[in-house]
């Protein structure tokens, strides 16, 4: 990542430039907020975002006077805080309101020196509907949606709440609106939480509908609800159990397989070979929540080995840091990860994500985003 000069980025005026020999001495710097930007939009109501910056960077002192933010602390941390404020100003100028999560994620990206700017990650719009814009909220999510643009088959693997399916559906709606595809096909295996369809009341459709309901709910966030029945009647949008995919060739379609951890290896092969001309496939799942009976292997687990070196197939791994639900969800995912790491393994078919440490808190195969290519592997 190429940094722009701090002064052009935030308009700050150095108050006390330390000499080279005094590089460890505290540095003072002033960042001037442009007058057209409200201080409340940057600092938050009751200075909530200012407090978040102070908690995230505890080694610096931050004071605000008018439209000036005064920083004092170790030079490298002052540089980071200066850069952070510059990124937050870009986000605000793009019309996106800031919140505590956005600030904390921006700090994390700057600390990790990622090649992507926080402002670029947090202002990437996918689709808008009824005044609501859907966009990635974390770096891994941004890399995930970029991979969907760049590859024909993408696997999104990660714990609950990381936006795997929601973002994939947003990309599908975007592709449909841009006429890149003629239809959207959403599917799930009808196996969950140890329940069997035969024990549920009602007709076959009544039994299947609860498994597909989350996909309908997401559609309502992205498309005018009044138009959904018309699009489904015309076959432009299809929501169906995985078993209904057998024997079909799906051309000019955006196809999403959700809850793929509950597919068998045979079902996964069947689904992937439905790919037709002009189509794109996104497969999502959480390999720590497999509900298959007995010793049935998860197709999502073993496909990582089978297709690791196939060109135009990409595996995106999300972690508890990418959870965008209630803050406790990320903590719960980590707690279960630690508990699973203490359990004895007996013939497990899962494999760690490339580069992950054994027993990592986010689960054995959810540590990083990995790009598998025939010419080699690039991890990020």
Image: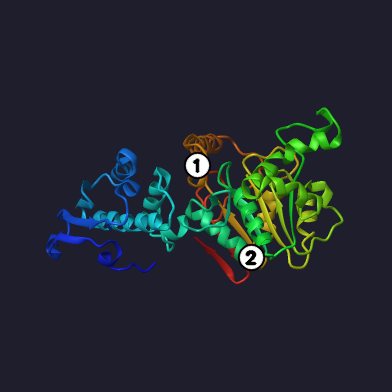
Q: What residue is shown with label 1?
A: 361
Q: Is residue 203 visible?
A: yes
Q: Whole-percent x and y of residue 146?
A: 56, 62
Of badges 1 and 2, nearer the viewer stands 2
The residue at the point 58 percent across, 62 percent down is 147
Q: Whole-percent x and y of residue 68?
A: 21, 53
14 to the left or right of 372: left
Q: How many marks?
A: 2
Q: Whole-percent x and y of residue 128?
A: 57, 53
45 to the left or right of 328: left
The residue at the point 61 percent across, 39 percent down is 345
Give whichever of 335, 217 is nearer the camera.
217
Name which of mark 1 and mark 2 comes first in the sequence.
Answer: 2
Position of residue 148 relative to residue 302, above or below, is: below
Q: Quarter-wise, where is residue 45 in the image?
A: top left
Label 1, label 2: how far apart the Cα atoms are: 29 Å
Q: What residue is shown with label 2?
A: 151
Give whichever of 190, 31 is nearer the camera.
31
Q: Is residue 351 visible?
A: no
Cβ–Cβ under 8 Å for marks 1 and 2: no
């Amino acid at each position: 990542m190429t940094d722009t000069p701090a002064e052009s980025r935030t308009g700050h005026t150095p108050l006390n430039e330390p000499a080279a020999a005094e590089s460890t001495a505290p540095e003072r710097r002033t960042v001037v907020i442009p007058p057209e930007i409200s201080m409340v939009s940057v600092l938050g109501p009751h200075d909530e975002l200012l407090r978040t910056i102070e908690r995230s960077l505890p080694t610096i002192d931050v004071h605000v006077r008018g439209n000036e933010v005064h920083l004092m602390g170790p030079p490298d941390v002052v540089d980071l805080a200066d850069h952070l404020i510059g990124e937050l100003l870009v986000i605000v100028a793009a019309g996106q309101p800031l919140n505590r999560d956005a600030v904390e994620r921006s700090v994390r990206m700057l600390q990790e020196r990622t090649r992507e700017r926080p402002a670029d990650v947090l202002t990437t719009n996918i689709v808008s509907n009824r005044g609501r814009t859907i966009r990635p909220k974390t770096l891994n999510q941004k890399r995930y949606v970029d991979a969907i643009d760049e590859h024909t088959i993408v696997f999104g693997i990660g714990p609950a709440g990381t936006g795997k399916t929601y973002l994939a559906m947003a990309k599908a709606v975007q592709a449909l609106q841009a006429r890149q595809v003629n239809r959207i096909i959403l599917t799930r295996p009808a196996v969950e939480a140890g329940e069997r369809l035969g024990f549920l009341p009602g007709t076959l459709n009544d039994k299947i509908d609860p498994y597909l309901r989350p996909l309908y709910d997401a559609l309502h966030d992205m498309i005018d609800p009044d138009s959904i029945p018309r699009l489904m009647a015309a076959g432009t949008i299809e929501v169906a159990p995985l078993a209904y995919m057998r024997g079909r060739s799906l051309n000019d379609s955006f196809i999403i397989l959700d809850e793929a951890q509950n597919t068998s290896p045979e079902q996964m092969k069947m689904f992937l070979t439905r790919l037709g001309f002009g189509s794109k496939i996104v497969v999502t799942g959480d390999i720590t929540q497999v509900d298959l009976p007995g010793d049935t292997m998860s197709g999502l687990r073993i496909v990582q080995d089978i297709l690791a070196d196939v060109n135009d197939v990409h595996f995106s791994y999300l972690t508890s840091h990418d959870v965008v639900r209630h803050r406790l969800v990320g903590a719960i995912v980590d707690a279960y990860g630690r508990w699973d790491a203490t359990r004895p393994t007996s013939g497990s078919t899962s494999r760690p994500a490339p580069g992950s440490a054994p027993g990592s808190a986010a689960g054995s195969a959810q540590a990083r985003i990995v790009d598998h290519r025939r010419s080699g592997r690039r991890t990020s």
